[in-house]
Amino acid sequence: MKLRSANQIRLDEMTDSVFDLLLAASGFEARATYGSEKALAVASFKQKVALGFPDRQTGSRQDNDKKFSKLGFELIQGDSSSQLPVRDVLTRALNESAGTSSVFRVLVDYSSMTKTWYAAVLNWVRDFDSANFNIEVVFFYSCSSYSDPQSVAPNAYAGPIEGFSSLASPRSPTALILGLGYQSDRAVGLVEYLEPDETHLFYTDPASSKEFVTAVLKNNKDLIDALGEERVFSYPYSNLRTTSLLLSSLALGLAKTHRLILAPLGPKPFSLLCLLLAYEHIDSIDVWRVGSGAQGQTYPRKPSGEFIICSTVFSTIEEKWP
């Protein structure tokens, strides 16, 4: 399916909306249920499903499971590194709503999801093949309050996300766009692993908190200094349109002459923008995930009360979405 539109919306713009599915994740973060609770207060949902990780059942995980149950969610455990749990839930929800409308509407609260899971939503949409049909996916993100970065465990994986590995020639020079997180050594480790011919860095400023910006700049100082200010870009955390324009203008230029890799290590909304850009240019852009898997540190991450919401529309219909 083709991506017809992607727009940032406010929570109050969802008032009285009706969705076929609310898909969330029950993890160890304190904010895991917060976004879904706020969405349920303004919109209605025919089905509600929360996916839970089978590993790292620490922090607020047990409390989150209980909260989701009280909210009427079906709880399903699934491998956080596999796209199958997400694809299965979406297919089932679509089948149960079949024939009721030419539009399938899903809200995905990806606040506590792995990249694999919210990338799976886009892969599922891409693979969907039905004439005269629209799918609307609202990607709902509950921002977190600041918590200090912890020591970084060794990377358990570093490679392209399933469905987001391009057909660009490996003989082409490699360009890397890194979305910086605030953990030390993660970005440097990836640069050393890939040895790209060209590297550009993105970080949030302004961010959800000044502490986050300070930590990002401090823990990535050596890499930032080595590349120089002409290769380092700041973007506004809560403005998806501005960030998308900045990212796409650089990325699409590089993709003409390089094998381009997007590696978003930082906030999830930036990761989502990378995935959406690659969705439209799948033949020329990779999106990579890098992490420590089950050995990684867990963070409490309480909700800040701010939301970043992106409404996307995909269609097999040639006309523009009304």
Image: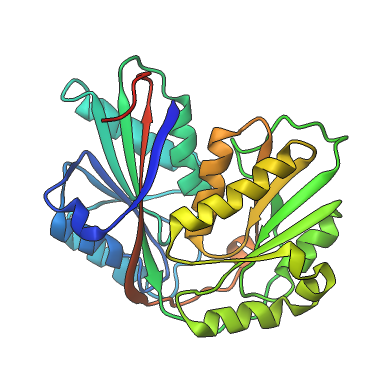
Out of 209 and 24, give the one closest to the viewer.
Answer: 209
Q: Is residue 66 left or right of residue 262?
A: left
Image coordinates of residue 299 in percent, x first then y, are 49, 76
Q: Is residue 148 visible?
A: yes
Q: Is residue 220 above or below residue 211?
A: above
Quarter of image, res 53 = bottom left
Question: Which quarter shows the N terminus?
Answer: top left
Please identify the residue farthest to the top as the structure is shown.
Answer: 131
The residue nearer to you, when weighing 129 against 291, is 129
Left-right relation of 100 to 264: left
Q: Position of residue 205 (x, y in %)?
A: 54, 73
Q: Nearer the viewer, residue 188 or 33?
A: 188
When the figure is inspected, residue 308 is found, relative to residue 60, above or below; the finding is above
Residue drawn at 44 percent across, 78 percent down: 300
Q: Could you say where residue 270 lies in the image, as x and y percent from the top left?
A: 53, 57
Residue at the spot 81% in from the left edge and 31% down from the top edge = 169
Farthest left residue in view: 16
Name which residue lies at 58% across and 65% down: 266
The quarter of the picture where residue 144 lies is bottom left
Whether 143 is drawn above or below 293: the answer is below
Tell me what residue is drawn at x 68 percent, y 74 percent: 152
- The quadrant of the rendering that contains the C terminus is top left
Q: Does the image show residue 53?
A: no
**Image side of residue 54 versus residue 177, left or right:** left
Residue 19 is left or right of residue 232, and the answer is: left
